Image: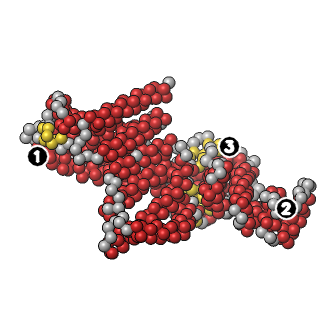
């Protein structure tokens, strides 16, 4: 029922907003402001409708989060501003109208836009979870509120002509208060500007402490912001050089529509983890566009100016610029793709340096603080170390205290080991957070019944590996081979060894070890197939050998290795490996498959 009520409210408000936008469009066509670009007027509604639509969708699906309502508020306010602007313009320019209604509309227009900036600043400050990044950010909240109040007071009650409609006197102006109100607005404007910049900066502060999910939410919004800034920079260059006659301001307006769209994707988590691939493509595309633009400007504009030719007037220079760009695009594209992979899929060490605490459970178990391994002596207790291992194996799921006591102190009475578990828990927390920079529950959450790891505040290498492997295999199933190969290569590199190799015979470690190993086999097998299909048989051989290092009885890997060697012309090695395969199958009493021909996969 609550969901239906929320939907009804959101749908009603969105319908009203859309109706207001239609009214503004009608007024715009009835009376057009001289000197204003029609394209600007049309493109202005793209971000307006993007904010209101994205905000309505988020408010419906996540009504408790303020982000959706704030986005919606931005869209509504700017829609109202558009209606008021066109109505005031219609009253003053297009023809006669009611002076009273025109004065009231101009008065609202003079200050209501401030509310849009307030809502947008709050959105950035509270995105994505509705909480401030920290207590110190309350200063920004109060400063923005105070500055906005001063600006609103100055705009609403300053006597005399209004800034948004100089031909109309403020009907609510306070006579004799111009000096105080002018000073209030003069003080409030920089306060609002600084607060808005700080609100955007809060995203960077939040990113440093964010978990994997929240980092990707922030990256979506950051990506939209980067696109907006890139459009602005490229547009300014093209406009200053006279290369294009397009009004760049029109493009700025349209590109800002990406912010609410990216925010909706981030909050609703629709294809959230695809941001890695989007960023990778954006890096490659942006680099290529920048290179082509630089070549064109350097040759057509620079050389043209040197020899006295106007922009676009020399066909030879344009052809030369095109040829130079074509020659440089391919090698640059390869370098940009490598750089994008490094950004999108950082190495384990890079990821760990970004985190307060990182846990390596693939291969030898290690805990790293700030990228440096915690010495074994710091644990003081082997049981505390084992406790963390068990919680890692549980993948953030709650584990009852009884299960933990049974695993750590089997065959001992509960009344004896209950206190031991509490001591081990306190020791583990002290190792993870020796300076007590976080609440006790930040890394390890415990209640009277169960204990679990909070993976949102930890970097665990096996979790990162499984995430990359799952993503890569899903991309491969979708036929997106280039993207799948990049993700799978990152996953294969991240697999430093079997899960907790030093605890090979512990029952609690077996399920996680088998899951990770199965994921590795699928990853390496898929990479081998991709390499074989592309003709890189040597790479296929290496992947099959890595699988057999961990599972010497994997029949598919044996046969794939023999086929890859045969295709690569290494027939002697292929025959020898086939004999090894036959011996292994005989050991486990499995029928031997025929020797793969060079045509077989």
Disc 1 crowd rating (10 Å Cα; few below 14, some 14-19, many 20+) is: few
Q: Which residue is mark 2?
A: 597
Colour approach in the figure: secondary structure
Q: Examine the rendering and report whether any part of residue 54 can be seen.
A: yes
Q: Which residue is mark 1?
A: 179
Q: Residue at x 18, y 44 (%)?
A: 163
Q: Which dot marks residue 402? A: 3
Q: Residue at x 71, y 47 (%)?
A: 406
Q: Is residue 267 above or below residue 503?
A: above
Disc 2 crowd rating (10 Å Cα; few below 14, some 14-19, many 20+) is: few
Q: CB atoms at circles 3 and 2 under 8 Å apart?
A: no
Disc 3 crowd rating (10 Å Cα; few below 14, some 14-19, many 20+) is: some
Q: Earlier in the sequence, mark 2 or mark 1?
A: 1
Where on the picture, by quarter, is residue 161?
top left
Query: For numbered disc 2, what is the local secondary structure?
Result: loop
Residue 8 at x, y = what percent?
A: 44, 26
Q: Which numbered disc, 2 or 1, marks the residue closer to the eye?
A: 2
Q: Which dot marks residue 227? A: none
Residue positioned most to the left: 176
Q: Earlier in the sequence, mark 3 or mark 1?
A: 1
Residue 500 at x, y = what percent?
A: 69, 58
Q: Which numbered disc, 3 or 2, marks the residue closer to the eye?
A: 2
- Is 572 displayed left or right of 198 in the figure? right
Residue 68 at x, y = what percent?
A: 42, 39
Cα separation, mark 3 vs mark 2, equals 56 Å
Q: Which numbered disc, 3 or 1, marks the residue closer to the eye?
A: 1
Residue toward you, 150 or 27: 27
Residue positioned most to the top: 1
Q: Residue at x 34, y 42 (%)?
A: 42
Q: How many marks?
A: 3
Cα separation, mark 2 vs mark 1, equals 92 Å
Q: CB atoms at circles 2 and 1 under 8 Å apart?
A: no
């Amino acid at each position: 029922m609550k969901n239906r009520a929320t939907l009804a409210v959101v749908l009603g408000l969105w319908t009203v907003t859309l109706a207001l936008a239609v009214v503004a469009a009608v007024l715009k066509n009835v009376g057009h402001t001289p000197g204003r670009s029609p394209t600007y007027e049309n493109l202005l509604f793209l971000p307006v409708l993007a904010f209101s639509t994205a905000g309505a969708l988020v408010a419906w699906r996540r009504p408790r989060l303020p982000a959706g309502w704030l986005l919606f508020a931005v869209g509504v306010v700017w829609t109202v501003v558009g209606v008021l602007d066109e109505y005031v313009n219609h009253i003053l320019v297009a023809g006669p109208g009611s002076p009273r209604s025109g004065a009231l509309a101009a008065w609202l227009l003079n200050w209501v836009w401030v509310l849009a900036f307030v809502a947008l600043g709050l959105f950035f400050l509270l995105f994505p979870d509705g909480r401030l990044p920290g207590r110190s950010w309350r200063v920004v909240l109060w400063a923005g509120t105070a500055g906005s109040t001063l600006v609103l007071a100055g705009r609403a009650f300053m006597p005399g002509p209004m800034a948004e409609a100089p031909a109309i006197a403020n009907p609510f102006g306070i006579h004799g208060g111009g000096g105080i109100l002018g000073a209030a607005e003069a003080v409030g404007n920089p306060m609002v500007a600084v607060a808005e910049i700080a609100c955007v900066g809060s995203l960077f502060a939040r990113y440093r402490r964010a978990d994997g999910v929240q980092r990707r939410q922030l990256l979506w919004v950051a990506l939209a912001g980067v696109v907006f800034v890139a459009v602005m920079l490229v547009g300014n260059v093209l406009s200053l050089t006279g290369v294009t006659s397009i009004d760049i301001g029109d493009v700025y307006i349209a590109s800002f529509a990406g912010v609410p769209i990216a925010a909706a994707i981030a909050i609703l988590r629709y294809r959230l983890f695809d941001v890695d691939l989007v960023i990778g493509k954006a890096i490659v595309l942006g680099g290529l566009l920048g290179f082509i633009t630089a070549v064109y400007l350097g040759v057509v504009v620079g050389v043209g100016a040197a020899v006295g030719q106007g922009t676009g007037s020399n066909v030879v220079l344009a052809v030369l610029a095109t040829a130079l760009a074509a020659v440089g695009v391919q090698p640059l594209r390869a370098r940009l793709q490598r750089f994008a992979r490094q950004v999108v899929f950082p190495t384990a060490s890079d990821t760990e340096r970004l985190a307060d605490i990182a846990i390596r459970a693939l291969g030898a178990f290690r805990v790293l603080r700030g990228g440096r391994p915690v010495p074994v002596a710091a644990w003081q207790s082997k049981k505390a170390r084992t406790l963390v291992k068990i919680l890692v194996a549980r993948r953030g799921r709650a584990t009852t205290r009884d299960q933990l006591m049974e695993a750590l102190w089997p065959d001992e009475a509960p009344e004896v080991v209950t206190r031991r578990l509490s001591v081990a828990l306190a020791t583990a927390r002290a190792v993870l957070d020796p300076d007590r920079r976080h609440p006790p529950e930040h890394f390890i959450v415990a209640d009277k019944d169960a204990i679990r790891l909070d993976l949102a505040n930890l970097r665990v290498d096996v979790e990162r590996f499984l995430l990359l492997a799952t993503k890569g295999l899903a991309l491969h199933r979708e036929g997106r081979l280039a993207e799948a190969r990049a993700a799978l290569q990152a996953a294969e590199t991240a697999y430093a060894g079997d899960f907790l190799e030093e605890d090979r015979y512990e029952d609690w470690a077996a399920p996680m070890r088998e899951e990770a190993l199965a994921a590795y086999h699928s990853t390496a097998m898929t990479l081998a197939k991709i390499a074989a299909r592309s003709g890189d048989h040597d790479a296929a051989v290496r992947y099959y050998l890595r699988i057999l290092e961990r599972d010497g009885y994997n029949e598919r890997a044996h046969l794939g290795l023999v086929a890859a060697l045969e295709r690569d012309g290494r027939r002697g090695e292929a025959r020898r490996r086939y004999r090894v395969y036959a011996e292994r199958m005989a050991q486990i009493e499995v029928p031997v498959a025929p020797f793969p021909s060079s045509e077989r996969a």
